Amino acid sequence: MKVLNSILWILQILVSALFIYSGCMKLFMPIDHQAAMYPWTGQVAPGFVRFMGVIDLLGGIGLLIPLLAMYAASGIVLLMVCASVFHIARGEASVIGFNIAVAIIAAFIAWGRKRLA
């Protein structure tokens, strides 16, 4: 169980860093700068991008709080499924590999934290 706990913490920290970075970028970086890297951010309402930044930031923080980690990881799985649907609907199916990989890691975190609870 100690090995599983260590693996989960490593994954939680990595995924948390990803989501905190992404959240801060969506919240504080000008939309035109984001659109240069991720075209969809320039093609939706700025309020939606900022809202997604809040969601990403909360998910990243939630992964670091032991009592919330299982729930945050489950929410991230749902978020990645929604992101995949969003990209497929926009004809961007080629970019969902990242979303699927993050969803699998988050599902493992949720499973592991539930098992250790």
Image: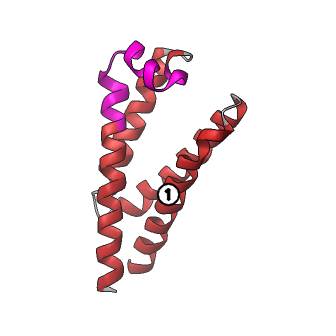
The magenta-colored residue range is 22-41
**Is residue 82 visible to us here?**
no
Q: Residue at x 27, y 58 (%)?
A: 65
Compared with 109, 93 (above or below) is above
Quadrant in which residue 94 is drawn: top right
From the image, tell me which residue sits under label 1: 74
The quadrant in which the C terminus is found is bottom left
Quadrant of the rendered image containing residue 4: bottom left
Image quadrant in which you'd find residue 13: bottom left
Is 56 rendered above or below residue 15?
above
Q: Is residue 81 left or right of residue 3?
A: right
Furthest-bottom residue in this view: 1
Amino acid, disc 1: Ser
Q: In the image, what residue occupies the spot 49% across and 51% down?
A: 75
Give x and y (percent) for residue 102.
49, 54
Characterize the magenta stretch by its predominant secondary structure.
helix
In reply to whether residue 45 is colored magenta, the answer given is: no
Query: Residue 14 in the image: x percent, y percent?
Result: 32, 56
Check if residue 39 falls in the magenta segment.
yes
Is 91 left or right of 103, judged from the image as shown? Answer: right
Q: Is residue 6 left or right of residue 99?
A: left
The residue at the point 29 percent across, 84 percent down is 2
Q: Judge left or right: residue 14 versus residue 100.
A: left
Q: Quadrant of the N terminus?
A: bottom left
